[in-house]
Amino acid sequence: MANKQIDMRKAKRIFKLYGEGVSKRQISKQLGLSRNTVSKYIDFFKRYRLTPYEVSAMTLEEIHRLFRSDQKPKSDQLKTLEKYFPYFDKELRKTGVTKQLLWEEYYARHPDGFKLSQFRYWYREWAKEVSPVMHFTHKAGDKLFIDFTGKKLSVVDKHTGELQELEVFVCVLGSSQYTYVEACASQKLEDFMRCTENALWFYGGVPRALVTDNLKSAVTKSSRYEPKVNDTFADFAEHYETAVLPTRAYRPRDKAIVENAVRIIYTRVFAPLRNSTFHSKADINKAISGLLKTHNDRSFRGREYSRRSMFEEVERQELGPLPLKRYEIRSYAKGTVHKNSHTYLGKDKHYYSVPYRHIGKQVKIIYTDSFVEIYHKHERLAAHTRKRQKYGYTTVAEHMPSHHRFVSEWSSEKFIAWAGHIGDSCKGYIIGILDKKQHPEQSYKSCLGILHLAKKVGDRRLDNACRRASDYGAYSYNMVERILKKGWDALEEDPQENIEVPDHKNIRGGNYYK
């Protein structure tokens, strides 16, 4: 055999072309290999009496193992060293552990063993054999590699039979290769962040960095040197006290570990589910969870430990702690602080108080599912629990201008005294409006509008209108204005009670129904 093995894919290609009748000279030209190398590989397959069909059906792993078995027997010295390699593989993932340090430990026990350069060489050869795609040894707790699969899974609507395709999120911890998989509706920011968050809670800790592909959900502008991370995803990373490291564009080696995980997931998750029908995202994720457990519990090739055992033994304790609660996606709005010291959140049609000294200022409102924050030029002015009551008010008493000039001009006492000059009914109605709100200043505009109506209709009509509105139990400017407009203030009793039935021969009368 040649001293240096060629890629196993080329080895398969050599014998395939040879079986199709292509000459060794043509094979040499097509594959860029010497004729001696082509002849040696053809002779190797012939020696094992393999047909081109049998070789094409073999996996790369099987061919690699076949070539390894054809090599010279290993020396006792090498066999002794190789016994340590699984232990070295685990230790190298721990912070501060190097090959130099491990060699020193090995050489102290075996003074007749290999020197450092040979130690490094044989370890690389072993690593290629047991894990040919993984060329980096990642430190425990350092990085979580994130990607979506190219292929999709699907669910079927029970009622319509409509097929809905689902994206499949995959992430893998660099050191243990402990894997998490979840099906989601899309690759949009909200779904992407929820899947990433679910993965962190699945692991029970936070790595020092999240390594993402150049997804639009994670990166707004890709760059080889300074990619721009999405603001919301950056805020998510800050909440979990980790960093975001986008991979370089067109550099697949940056995320080789997750690319390999995706290929394995196609075999161990996609293939077993190919003949199953699911009607909801929850059902398919439950099935994925069972297959994922089997995958993580399976031992690595050539090693006696699994992803799960590596995670539990080496990586779990290196992860950072989770925060007390999950991240809430933030939304943004603009507003103005009104004269009543409140700003309006249009999403919920609700008012939130702001300290009175900021009246008239333009503010930025940041809100999540549970809280609302109000900012002016990066300064947080107020924070409230989010309420969804339409046209309601959420007020902090300290925000209201109790000793401000605004209150000296508009106060509860002033409005009550003003209403008392119009009439007792008006005074009682104004008190009712002031009592209705959480804070009196929230009703000042309503009071002012009602009292100003006296200029149009006179004190007597306004007092009657307030009495009528009180009877209805409706305390608002709009109700008083409507009563005056309809002329109901002139009615002594409820207009519905004094309706007289005219005497007419077509009216049957009560005896008709006996």
Image: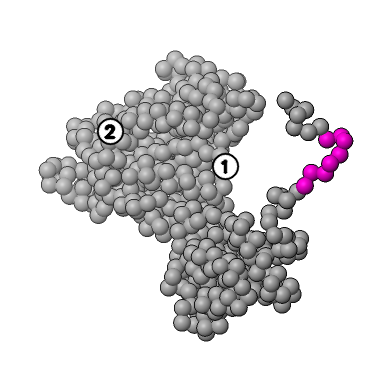
- Amino acid under disc 2: Tyr
Most common SS among magenta residues: loop
Q: Residue at x 34, y 29 (%)?
A: 298
Could you say where residue 204 lies in the image, as x and y percent from the top left? 33, 45
Q: Residues within 10 Å of mark 2 (few under 14, many from 20)?
A: some
> Disc count in the image?
2
- Of 121 and 206, the residue lying toward us: 206
**Residue labelled with disc 2:** 305
Q: Is residue 414 shown left or right of residue 480?
A: left
Q: Could you tell me if residue 313 is visible in this image?
A: yes
Query: Is residue 171 shown above or below 489?
Result: above
Tell me where the magenta segment starts and ends, as one range. 500-507
Quadrant location of the C terminus?
top right
- Front one among 139 and 453: 453
Report the residue marked by disc 1: 186
Q: Residue at x 44, y 30 (%)?
A: 286
- Work out whether mark 2 precedes mark 1 in sequence or the reverse, and give the earlier one: 1
Picture disc at residue 137 = none
What's the residue type where badge 1 is placed? Ser
- The answer to which image quadrant residue 345 occupies is bottom right
Real-space CA distance between mark 2 and mark 1, rounded to the nearest whole angstrom: 35 Å
Q: Which element is circle 2 on?
A: loop
Q: Residue furthest right?
A: 505
The quarter of the image holding the N terminus is: top left
Is 505 magenta? The answer is: yes
Q: Secondary structure at mark 1?
A: loop
